[in-house]
Amino acid sequence: MAKIEVTKTELVWPGKYNEDGTRKEVPRVNLPFQVIETVNESRATREVQKTTSLGLFSVYEGKEGDTFEAGWRNKLIWGDNLLVMGSLLEKFAGKIDLIYIDPPFATGADFSFTAEVGDSGIELEKEQSVIEEKAYRDTWGSGLQSYLEMLAGRLILAKDLLSQQGSIYVHLDHNVSHYVKILLDGIMGHENYRNEIVWLRTTGHSDSKTYSHIHDTILFYTKSEDWTWNKQFTEYSEEYKDGFYRNIDSDGRRFTSSDLTAAGTRNGPSGESWRGIDIAARGKHWIYPVSKLDELDKNGGIYWPEKAGGMPRLKRYLDSMPGVILRSIWNDISSVGPHAKERTGYSTQKPEALRERILKASSSAGGLVLDFFVGSGTACVVAEKLGRRWIGCDLGRWGIHVTRKRLLGIENCKPFEVLNLGKYERQYWQGVTFGGKGKSITEQALYEYLAFMLKLYGAQPVSGLVHLHGKKGKAMVHIGAVDAPVTIDEINLAISECLKLKQSELHVLGWEWEMGLNDLMVGEAKKQGVKLLLLQIPREVMEQQAVDKGDIQFFELAYLEVEIKKGKGRTAAIALKDFVIPNTELIPEEVRSKVRKWSDYIDYWAVDWDFRNDTFMQGWVAYRTRKQRKLPLASDQHTYEKPGKYRVLVKVIDIFGNDTSQAFDVEVR
């Protein structure tokens, strides 16, 4: 390896530098975002702001303003945070006011949580998904080396996203805090280090041969010397109050007193005699003009000692004092207990009070907050409650779902969007994996993509056919494109080719699907004598470690049955009648044993009353919470403004975080 020129103190690990001695560059991939759902916003509002529709999902154009009044919508993004942050740079470089992250510690518990099933709320320990396990392997697969490599790239992008007045807080445990301190010094600059905050998360812990580990560390850095700072205070201790606020007023208020005078004489109103006291003769002056002293005395704001000749003093009431200025050891915020109202089931969930303190100190109302390890969504929830704008990102599908539900539980929650990189991330993956970096997708690359997918599915390639790509046992196989939904016409063409070959079974693998396709096509194929299976290509296909480990599973699409109930006038309501997950044998027995009826698999469902083949607009929603387990299976009535034909889209999210959407047509007169 070439010689590395060391010009400053830095943290070095295997893989930090290339063979030629140059620092490995952080990938800065700029991909468009897809808006897959909008929450708490009417379609009428959205149509005014929208200029174009580009298919199944809208593309985020980043044209909204920087305030809620100017059309800003908060953003919840599902995806790899490295790609997400790189894609945020174009619109948000230098615009983020506060970043708080709680990256995974050295424990698999970071991706596990307790979920509840059905109306009874039976608890189930949900282990990390394949993609979350991949994230853990990426983070800790090679020990500390891979953790530092993972974190360094993301911190470099975080610095670029921060505004000049911005701050970053990194939440760590005792295993890595000292390493990350040096890492942050190198990225943010040692001169921009502000604090090491010690959070006492528990009061007791039993360790056999060491001192008990009862605290986490939060490292606080800023982008520059000019950062947003709002002083925070904590309550006085009882000992302090008893010692310094011993006096009690006639109305029961506790107070202490302070001097009403200052050194030096004055010729103005503050130097005049008052209540028989010649203040100038004492070489002093009043801290207020005598007119103000009269007003204070009239209102009981001055303390007169009982001792004759004692000087009057200013009353300082305990309930009007801000408290003790906040210090760097925080022992007044408890961790999230098993019975806490805010508990979501994530073992690593941090209390809202902790995030609230940081957001209040280092951001202002309307400021933009980013958390790219969002977990159960605490940062987004607190930012919403405090009137901050926010962007949250997470790799876990369930984390995005839990965050969405928590936000919906906030009264008057502002509109927000759920986004992903969708087909653009898949196009990027296809180009890098099969076409070479920076190369267009050639015919050879497409062939390699199809061969790769067929191998993962356990199928053999076939040649000389147009719409059929392989065969698995007795079934023909069709592979959907990475950048477009599988369509009804596409499946019809594959069925026709099956019939010409006298093949009676067809498996179609797809990333996305045309709405309303499932029931229609399975039934239509059956009429023609073809057994049709529609299988979801999982996102894990793009993760080489998951592929190498053999973790890829293709699941049949779930489907739902609804009843559309038309009321008087132009009204309609939706009732769920069934929800079927075909591959129940692939669901762990511990889960299946707790499911009593089909609706137990459903955690959330929502309706878009006027789906326009673009972004899902949540018009009605119902979901389970830890407090309210019973899920209504019928929607409220919706009234259409005009008669006509409408497409209704129903979205169901199951207890695994997977969503199933199905479209239905309704006509009102």
Image: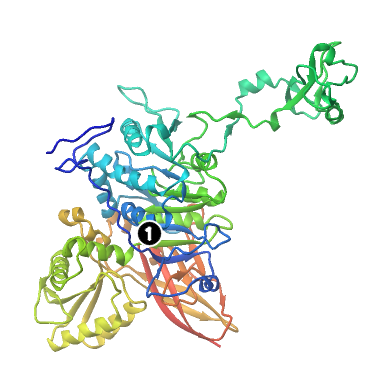
Residue at image position (9%, 82%) is 464
Residue extending farthest to the front is: 267
Q: Is residue 591 above or below residue 499?
A: above
Name the residue: 85% across, 11% down.
Answer: 309
Up the image or down, 46 lies above or below 294; here it is below
Q: Amino acid at mark 1?
A: Ile
Left or right: 151 as drawn, with respect to 164: left
* Front residue (pair 201, 601): 201
Quarter of the image with the C terminus in it = bottom right
Is 361 placed left or right of 580 in the picture?
A: right
Q: How far across and down, in percent of the image, does residue 298 sit?
A: 87, 30
Label 1: how many Cα within 10 Å (few below 14, some 14–19, many 20+):
many
Is residue 457 rendered to the left or right of residue 635? left
| Residue with the mark numbered 1 | 655
- Identified at 60% across, 83% down, the residue is 568
Residue 8 x, y percent position in the rendering: 28, 31
Q: How is the image coloured?
A: rainbow
Query: Is 207 in front, or is 592?
Result: 207
Q: Nearer the viewer, residue 664 or 588?
A: 664
Find residue 16 and report its image quarter: top left
Report the front residue among 20 and 420: 20
